[in-house]
Image (spheres, rainbow, N blue to C red):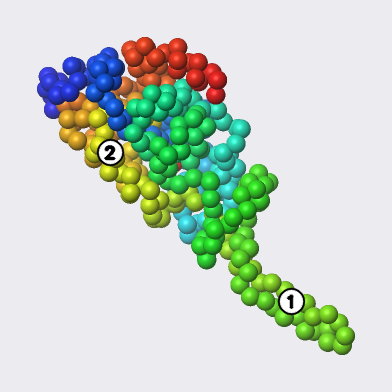
Amino acid sequence: ISEDTPPQNLSERSLAAVADFIKSGRARRIVVMTGAGISTAAGIPDFRSPETGLYANLAALNLPEPEAVFDLAFFQQNPRPFYALARELYPGARYRPTVSHAFLALLARKNLLHVLFTQNIDCLERAAGVPPDRIIEAHGSFATQRCIDCREPFADDAKMRESVERGEVPRCERVVGRDEDETDGIGGKEQDEERRCGGLVKPDIVFFGEALPKAFFERSGAVQEADLVLVMGTSLQVHPFAGLPNMAEEEVPRVLFNLERVGSFGTRADDVMVLGDCDAGVRKLADALGWRDELEKAWREL
Ligand code: CNA
């Protein structure tokens, strides 16, 4: 498309036009895709921003390359770097949702949020009050965990949390047999030692090469039902997630809130790019919608 290709659904390619589109009631099923950029204002570094990104700062952990932190083979040899990161990101009171998260919860409250696909593993969408049944955690979450050898779920969430907080790596406790100890023959009690699997336990965060959760594939069709798509704070470099915005119908307006242009944004007539900090972009949209006070209040109260 060129500068003067007219949009089909929006009156013009601007945030004001997006607000009018929503206010007219034509955007009733908004599908949102998010990434690490919506959480940087909460103090959680993203991966790929130069200097401030996690990948730039993982050098201290002695990794062969930063991506190794999410590599299964590397984890098997040395789970500590991942657990250092897990300790940092583990859901709890450490981080507070951003204005962008509060905006998503507001969309849900107004019954406009069809589905939110997130790549984030910080659970701040839930913390902001987005209903869990609207959220697809495409790269998994810390909610559950299992043994990487026998795949047995590790059910003791409290113990898991304790281990993570202490910086320990939990081991699989599944009983795989008994070692009969018959050495102290005469009159001594026989002791059966339970043999445990002992494999490394890993939260159900999707590592490179691992399959995405079933829910991702089951719900990805929701993008085709969207009448408005919002993409926020993601470099759109990780597949298959990166393909989601392209699944929207051609004439459906797509709005990008990001520091940089990413993916195929700008190739469709109804693409709007709001380049810059996503909280600032979201505040501008809220202003145009007349929702600003409501948004700030909701955010303050989180
Ligand atoms: P990424 O590749 O690091 O990209 C982040 C994108 O956000 C970049 O395009 C930045 O320019 C942009 N960005 C950064 N700050 C802002 C801001 N304030 N406003 C607007 N845009 C901003 O991260 P992706 O999410 O695209 O990569 C996918 C990985 C990163 C997923 O698998 C995540 O699990 C993983 N990750 C998650 C978290 C988290 O849960 N908060 C943190 C770091 C990495």
Where is residue 158 drawn, in percent x and y? 65, 48
Residue 178 seen anywhere in this rendered image of the structure: yes
Above or below — where is 192 with respect to 238? below
Above or below — where is 1 with respect to 17? below
**Mark linked to residue 103:** none
Q: Is residue 9 left or right of residue 85?
A: left
Which quarter of the rendering shows the N terminus?
top left
Where disc 1 sits, the SS reads: strand
Disc 2: which residue? 223
Q: Nearer the viewer, residue 156 or 42?
A: 156
Residue placed at 27% from the left, 43% from the top? 221
Residue 53 seen anywhere in this rendered image of the structure: no
Query: Which three-letter amino acid code belongs to the residue tagged 2?
Result: Val
Q: Quadrant of residue 187?
A: bottom right
Where is residue 62 drawn, in percent x and y? 55, 48
Q: Nearer the viewer, residue 109 or 125?
A: 109
Query: Which three-letter amino acid code belongs to the residue tagged 1?
Result: Asp
Residue placed at 53% from the left, 46% from the top? 143
Local crowd at mark 1 within 10 Å, few (<14), some, or many (≥20)?
Answer: few
Residue placed at 38% from the left, 16% from the top? 286
Disc 1: which residue? 192
Q: Quadrant of residue 294?
A: top left
Which quarter of the rendering shows the C terminus?
top right
Local crowd at mark 2 within 10 Å, few (<14), some, or many (≥20)?
Answer: many
Ligand 1 shown in quarter: top left
